[in-house]
Amino acid sequence: MTEAAGRAAGWRGRLPSRALGVFLVLILATFLASRTCGSTSGLLDEDEATAIAKREIDYPIDGTNVRFVRRGVSQHPYWAVSLWQRGAGGAGYRRITVVVVDAESGRVAQVDLNRTTP
């Protein structure tokens, strides 16, 4: 056996079992934290966000698109709900409104109305 291999084998033999146990506990705690910190339980679902967004407009809609997004350094969760009305003859869009709904509280964070010409 070479000198380097002997040193490596000696090091493993001297590793206290308590240190190994602490290391395994830390790995387990890290894994559990990663699973629970990013949890989306308790958040509004897509249908609730759409219902909140519909209350922000005053026109009949032809369709919706909903996206779950995270914003900012803290990665706060939001639903971006696009509500749209088709243009004359189904070509293009007459109105498009994007309502950003806080996925935790349900409050409307932003409303962007884009009226386009038919």
Image (tube, rainbow, N blue to C red):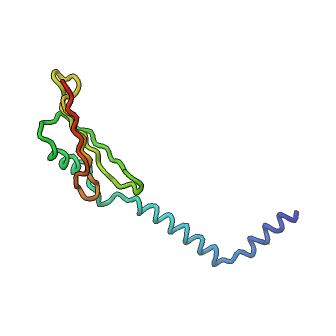
Q: State left or right for residue 37 relative to residue 52.
A: right
Nearest the viewer among 108 and 47 is 108
Judge from the rendering whether residue 33 lies leftward or rightward of residue 55; answer left or right.
right
Describe residue 6's horizontal placement relative to residue 110 as left or right: right
Name the residue at the right extreme. 2
In the image, what residue occupies the spot 25% across and 43% down?
Answer: 81
Residue 54 relative to residue 11: left or right:
left
Q: Nearer the viewer, residue 21 or 51?
A: 51
- Quarter holding the N terminus is bottom right
Report x, y in % for residue 56. Answer: 16, 45
Residue 62, percent across and down? 17, 33
Image quarter (top left, top right, bottom left or bottom right) of the C terminus? top left
Instruction: Classify 100 as above or below 104.
Output: above
- The residue lying toward the viewer, choosing from 76 and 36, is 76
Q: Position of residue 105 (x, y in %)?
A: 25, 59
User: Image height check: is 103 above or below 17?
Assistant: above
Image coords of residue 41 (percent x, y)? 32, 59
Number of disc labels: 0
Which residue is at a point 25% across and 39% down the rendered structure image?
Answer: 82
